[in-house]
Image (tube, grey):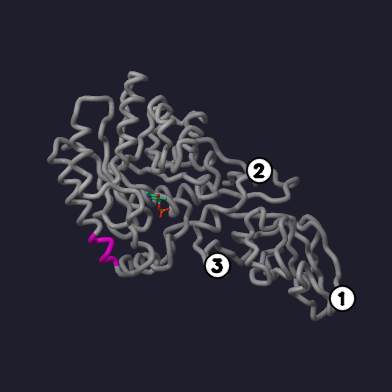
């Protein structure tokens, strides 16, 4: 395998580093967990949760993922245009007028609307090609899905000779990562088993089943079936604290963390200045200095995905030390206090998410400060910021 070199970041104002060794370690962990037979499908929707769909998809293939799951047709097309020949499951809505593109590129499509099936048959016949669908079964999430009353119509329509092939059935858990009580998830699992049995008996004995997102993969072997949809945890993040705790209770023998965060977000010091005591910093004068303050200006703001609610709350790492954010986070700029960090220089590297020295800022920590989840923190890092693979 080709060895990854450290990229040159000297002339970048802000960049995201993707650790190849961390990603490889996570993917290999999940392969061991699901075994060699299960289709390991990586979810790379929303720019691979902000990690960069192209570098992540390359690493995923390199380290043994079998296929991709995306939300939209456009995400699927990006993968094909970049040369990925693996199966791609489109899990979100495709407008009826664009179903021919699904057929033409041989994507797998989620199916839950009658109208989509009818239009898909017409599109496939026109192109004289077949197309594979995965029925989304309603088991209690009430997002997209086919309930028990509607299922017979789909099975009847799909048993007719035609270009649309039923390849899979799947469901998605509503309440598996937000709790340590998994009763609701198990009721969904039972319902999924019963509905899949019905599909199998009604003429589709070979249909593939999948239900597991990261939390289910980590916690319950019985949710793996023939395929899993691995999202957040391929990136080394836990779906939630509850999932982490539940996992730890089940795997007491394992002392260290099995997941390694893949993403770091960095910038550089753009200006250094001394500010006297009792001066306001930033818009709205929300911070006032209490002493002679050494201030570092950083070229990152909420437009870059550094949430404005982190104003006066979070800190960044410079020279391995914590530098607190002072005043409001601006659109493209933020200010941090480096008075207690000796010898900070212009263009010193700054860590917004990640480690420096013995300090670490996690996506979970920032998520906690602003009342959201790690998924949102990493996904909203502006997609135009370069994503660089590091060893
Ligand atoms: C996003 C998504 C996943 C991945 O979930 P994670 O918690 O990130 O692993 C799986 N299945 C469906 C249907 C999804 O939309």
Mark 2–mark 3 distance (CA, rounded to whole Å): 27 Å
Instruction: Check contact, mark 1 vs mark 3: CB within 8 A.
Output: no
Q: Nearer the viewer, residue 160 or 129?
A: 160
Query: Can you identify the residue that label 3 sits on?
Result: 365
Tell me what residue is drawn at x 25 percent, y 40 percent.
208
Q: Nearer the viewer, residue 226 or 37?
A: 226
Q: Is residue 62 above or below residue 175?
A: above
Label 1 Cα neighbours within 10 Å, binned few <14 / some 14-19 / many ≥20: some
Q: Is residue 250 above or below residue 226?
A: below
Task: Verify whether residue 210 appears in magenta.
Answer: no
Q: Nearer the viewer, residue 65 or 303?
A: 303
N-terminal-most mark, 1 or 2 = 2
Task: Verify whether residue 183 appears in magenta.
Answer: yes
Mark 1 vs ligand 1: CB below 8 Å: no
Query: Can you identify the residue that label 2 sits on?
Result: 7
Q: Is residue 275 above or below residue 304?
A: below
Tell me what residue is drawn at x 46 percent, y 31 percent.
84
Mark 1–mark 3 distance (CA, rounded to whole Å): 31 Å
N-terminal-most mark, 1 or 3 = 1
Residue 252 on image: x %, y %: 33, 69
Q: Exactly how many numbered labels are in the figure? A: 3
Question: What SS does tag 3 mark?
Answer: helix
Question: What SS does tag 1 mark?
Answer: loop
Of the numbered discs in the image, which one, if any, rests on residue 276? Answer: 1
Label 2 Cα neighbours within 10 Å, binned few <14 / some 14-19 / many ≥20: few
| Residue 193 relative to residue 375: left or right | left
Magenta segment: 182-187
């Amino acid at each position: 395998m080709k060895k990854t070199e450290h990229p040159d970041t000297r002339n970048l104002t802000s960049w995201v580093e993707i650790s190849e060794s961390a990603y490889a370690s996570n993917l290999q962990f999940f392969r061991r967990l699901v075994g060699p037979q299960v289709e390991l499908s990586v979810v790379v929707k929303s720019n691979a949760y902000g990690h960069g769909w192209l570098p992540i998809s390359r690493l995923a293939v390199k380290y043994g993922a079998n296929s991709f799951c995306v939300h939209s047709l456009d995400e699927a097309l990006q993968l094909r245009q970049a040369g990925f020949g693996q199966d791609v499951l489109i899990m979100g809505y495709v407008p009826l007028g664009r179903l021919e593109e699904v057929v033409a590129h041989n994507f797998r499509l989620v199916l839950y609307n009658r109208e989509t099936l009818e239009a898909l048959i017409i599109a496939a016949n026109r192109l004289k090609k077949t197309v594979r669908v995965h029925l989304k079964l309603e088991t209690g999430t009430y997002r997209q899905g086919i309930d028990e009353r509607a299922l017979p119509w789909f099975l009847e329509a799909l048993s007719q000779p035609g270009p649309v092939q039923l390849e899979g059935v799947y469901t998605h858990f509503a309440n598996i990562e937000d709790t340590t009580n998994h009763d609701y998830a198990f009721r969904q699992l039972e319902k999924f088993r019963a509905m899949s049995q019905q599909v199998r008996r009604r003429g589709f004995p070979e249909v593939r089943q999948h239900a597991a997102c990261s939390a289910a993969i980590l916690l319950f072997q019985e949710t793996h079936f023939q395929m899993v949809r691995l999202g957040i945890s391929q990136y080394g993040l836990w779906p939630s604290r509850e999932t982490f705790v539940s996992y730890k209770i089940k795997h007491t023998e394992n002392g260290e963390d099995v997941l390694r965060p893949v993403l770091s977000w960095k910038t550089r010091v753009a200006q250094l200045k001394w500010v006297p005591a009792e001066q306001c910093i930033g818009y709205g004068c929300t911070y006032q200095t209490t002493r002679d303050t050494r201030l570092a200006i950083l070229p990152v703001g909420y437009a870059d995905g550094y949430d404005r609610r982190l104003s006066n709350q979070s800190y960044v790492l410079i020279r391995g030390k914590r530098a607190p954010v002072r005043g409001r986070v601006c659109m493209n700029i933020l200010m941090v206090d480096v008075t207690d960090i000796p010898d900070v220089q212009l263009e010193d590297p700054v860590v917004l998410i990640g480690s420096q020295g013995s300090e670490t800022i996690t996506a979970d920590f920032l998520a906690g400060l602003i009342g959201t989840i790690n998924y949102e923190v990493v996904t909203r890092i502006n997609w135009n910021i370069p994503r660089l693979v590091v060893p």
